[in-house]
Amino acid sequence: MAHPQPPESDPQSPSAPTAPAKSPRVGLFVTCLVDMFRPSIGFATLKLLEDAGCTVVVPAAQTCCGQPAFNSGDNKDTRAIATQVIEAFEGLDYVVAPSGSCAGMIREHYPELFADDPAMAQRAQHVAKRTYELTSFLVDVLGVTKVDAAMAGTVTYHDSCSGLRELEVKVQPRRLLAGVSGLSLTELPGAEVCCGFGGTFCVKYPEISDKMVTNKAEEIVATGADTLLAGDLGCLLNMAGKLKRLGAETKVRHVAEVLAGMTDTPAIGDPAASLPNKER
Amino acid sequence: MQSTSRNFKDNAHKALNDATLQRALLNVKSGFQENRARTVAGLPEFERLRDAGRDIKNHVLANLDFYLERFEENVTANGGHVHWCRTPAEAREKILEICKRREAKTVTKGKSMVAEEIGLNDYLEENGVEPIETDLGEYIIQLRHEPPSHIIAPAIHVTREQIAVDFRREHSDLDPNRRLEEPRDFTDEARAKLRDKYFAADVGITGANFLIAETGSTVIVTNEGNGDMTQLLGKAHVVIASLEKIVPTLEDASTILRLLARSATGQEMSVYTSFSTGPRRSEDRDGPEEFHVVLLDNGRSAMLGTEFQDMLRCIRCAACMNHCPVYEAVGGHAYGWVYPGPMGSVLTPSLIGVEEAGHLPNASTFCGRCESVCPMRIPLPKMMRHYRQREFEKGLSPQKARAGLSVWSYVATRPKLYRLATRLASGLLGRLGKVKGRLTTLPLAGGWTSVRDMPAPEGKTFHDLYRDRQAAKGGRE
């Protein structure tokens, strides 16, 4: 990892005794899907942040960002969950999530949830301003230009909608991937088109979701890349699930796993047994 | 128009299994998206124009009464008439009244979505007046007895082969050996048929892209010239327009025109931009003897001052549906009413009620592509979410989903309970999917596993693993 620049703002000097003076205290927002489905992504994120000189804290009082309730029109429960997140993270310098969708929820939508409650709105704004998607945080805030990782092969990249359109995450993962030795990127046609996940959409309208993810899977296979990467586990589970159902060989991973050099685990949807002969 | 929005899921199912429709829908992507991207890239000030367009419309909506009255004054001063209609029924009756007074047997029509909204064609036919659509796309779907499936390309759901069959069926004098394959062939054939109709028509009815307050003009944009023929050759010209089409000045119309064609078809300008200002004056060589503007509200004024006001900025360019992956999958008819795609998913519940159209704001992944291309910067996903809120508050969302959400929210606001639940779920699913790395069926998750596999969890939660790791390090956190 190249030398990161100091963060743009570091209001209070970090209090963690083991951390160097200039090390920002970063709260890792694990996300509910990473917590339950693929902790590897959480540990990859942890490694990337620590390698970049951050002191990472994982607040225990986190569950989910509240999107399932928010997108179902249930603002009351969303506020309860958002309050929990704000309380857990507001003392930290930054909040970082390996997901554009969850980071976008906190950054773009938390403040508007408390439009009728100025005190909470201010706290929400405070947390929102400090919240970043992982690759955007590494590149835009810490100024990381190169990661210490290697992966032989060709990858293609899907731009998850929330990260792309709410947080302008587009060049950051590509810039970092360019520094992974042995890796080459083949761009995916329609990389900016939704994969059909959409949170509860994919189970409320499975047929439409199927059409969208089938298109996506066909385009992925057509690139000839051996691995598909993206920055959001929801989309990855959807695309991996479809690729598997179609019998495609394409491996699927979160971009953090590759950037952290942690690709010794089975890819998403792959059995552990296939590891020795296929992955190495 | 009768709505089938309530049956959105069934409509979508049929659309997804209609191979001909799916072939026709491929045109959405290849045509509109690429053309828009190219033209927009060629105009450096496009983003600033979007801001300007938004600001013009916001100003209008904040002063709508003023500009509408100003428009009426100027139309009247030019010798025309403005008819204020609250409901579709009032608008239909007013138009029929004009037709009856002119003893009209046929009327030519330029494209108008508002005419679809009020079910004008059926009403005129029932009352002995024959409406003839003059836009090629509208003409095709009139032959097919179908509603439009797109707001600027009404027949985009029809393939060329289907059109050839329709023309041969409906045009009895058509030479069986005549070639009907290329767009040009269809245009020539329709044009030959329509030419006489223009001259025979007693009344010409058009929609309007803009109503200009300072001059009392109406503006219509076409690529076929049919709008001009319709509005000039009839003895009376009737413009049917909804009240949010108003802009203060010619300058404002010009600003928005620069956005419209680029966003719609990817042209810099449409081929024809026609301004109508009053009936024929004594010194004019041609033009209609009467000029009427039927101004329709139909629920729009009730959107003012609500969280849906921004929707009234819409200029009907169709960029949102042209870039919508859901529209691309199911086409416009699945939405079940006049306006499909993202703009329809907000406008339809606004005009016919969220009880009837509740599916539409839900059938979105919130991918945000619609908002990213909307020339008027309408926050479409945000407004769809507002409708989901209304549905939730009114108890209209499905009972099962509400119950599930309520349990989930209870657990998600109790981190310790949540840890326990995720530990169990992750462990169980991890064991079930261990051998294959994925699950092909899963109780209660049929919506997922009916169409794709469920990648198996790794087996332990991050929080448990992290706690163990920190404990091994000596409890440092």
Image (cartoon, grey):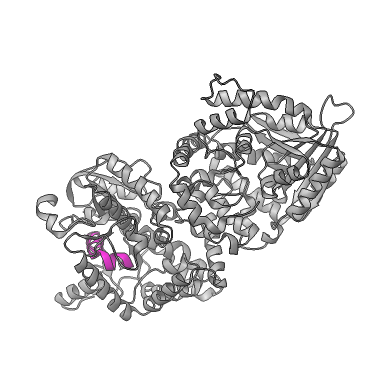
Of helix, strand and loop, which mostly describes the magenta segment? helix
Image x and y of residue B171, in percent? 63, 27
Question: Magenta segment: does it hold A40?
Answer: yes
Q: Residue furthest right?
A: B282
Image x and y of residue B325, in percent? 45, 48
Looking at the picture, does residue B416 appear above or below residue B14?
below
**Quadrant of the image occupied by residue A43:** bottom left
Q: Is residue B419 left or right of residue B363?
A: left
The one nearer the camera, B126 or A200, is: B126
Q: Is residue B355 left or right of residue B437?
A: right
Visible in this render: residue B283? yes
The one nearer the camera, A258 or A124, is: A258
- Where does the magenta region start and end? A30-52
**Quadrant of the image occupied by residue B98:** top right
Q: Residue furthest left?
A: A276
Question: Magenta segment: does it hold B107?
Answer: no
Image x and y of residue B174, in percent? 61, 23
Q: Residue at x 57, y 32 (%)?
A: B166
Looking at the picture, does residue B321 appear above or below residue A51?
above
The one nearer the camera, B91 or A46, is: B91
Visible in this render: residue A145? no
**Quadrant of the image occupied by residue A223:** top left
Looking at the picture, does residue A5 appear above or below residue A175?
below
Image x and y of residue A278, in percent? 13, 50
